[in-house]
Amino acid sequence: MSGGGSGYQHNPIDWGDHGSSKRGRTVVVLLRHGETQWNQQGRFQGQLNSDLTKEGERQALLAAKRLGRRFKFDAVVSSDLGRAAQTADIVVKNRERPPLL
């Protein structure tokens, strides 16, 4: 996902016809967490935690909207780090909730 001052570039993705609704096909979607306070400050986080900024929450909502048009998730796997779990929670919120692992 792109971030305000994080230095990451946003490249729109053409999702094509890769929905997981096709029988016999497994699709794995990788998603980076939204922008964090430390991303905004240019600080390295590693295994330390930093909460999502408002921009990071907006990025997660945008990802949820885009992914929701194409995919029905059977499961969601997330790191236990707050920023990743918070992003995953936003992405699956208000959907038929798959197990969050």
Image (spheres, grey):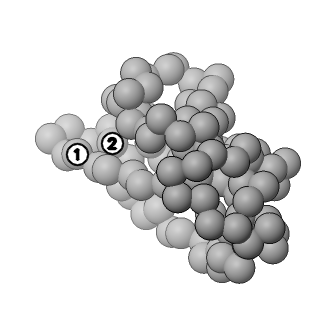
Label 2 sits on a secondary structure element that is: loop
Q: Mark 1 sits on what residue?
A: 26
Asked if residue 89 shows in the view, the reply is: yes
Q: In the rendering, at what x and y percent does residue 29 appear?
A: 39, 52
Kind of residue at badge 1: Thr
Q: Mark 2 sits on what residue?
A: 20
Quadrant of the image occupied by residue 82: top right
Q: In the image shown, does 75 or 70 lie closer to the viewer?
A: 75
Q: Marks 2 and 1, how far apart in space?
A: 6 Å
Q: In the image shown, does 57 or 50 lie closer to the viewer?
A: 50
Q: In the rendering, at what x and y percent does residue 56 appear?
A: 74, 52
Q: In the rendering, at what x and y percent does residue 37 appear?
A: 78, 55
Q: Which quadrant: the N terminus?
A: bottom right
Q: Is residue 61 left or right of residue 79?
A: right
Looking at this rendering, what residue extends furthest in the right direction?
54
Cβ atoms under marks 2 and 1 closer than 8 Å: yes
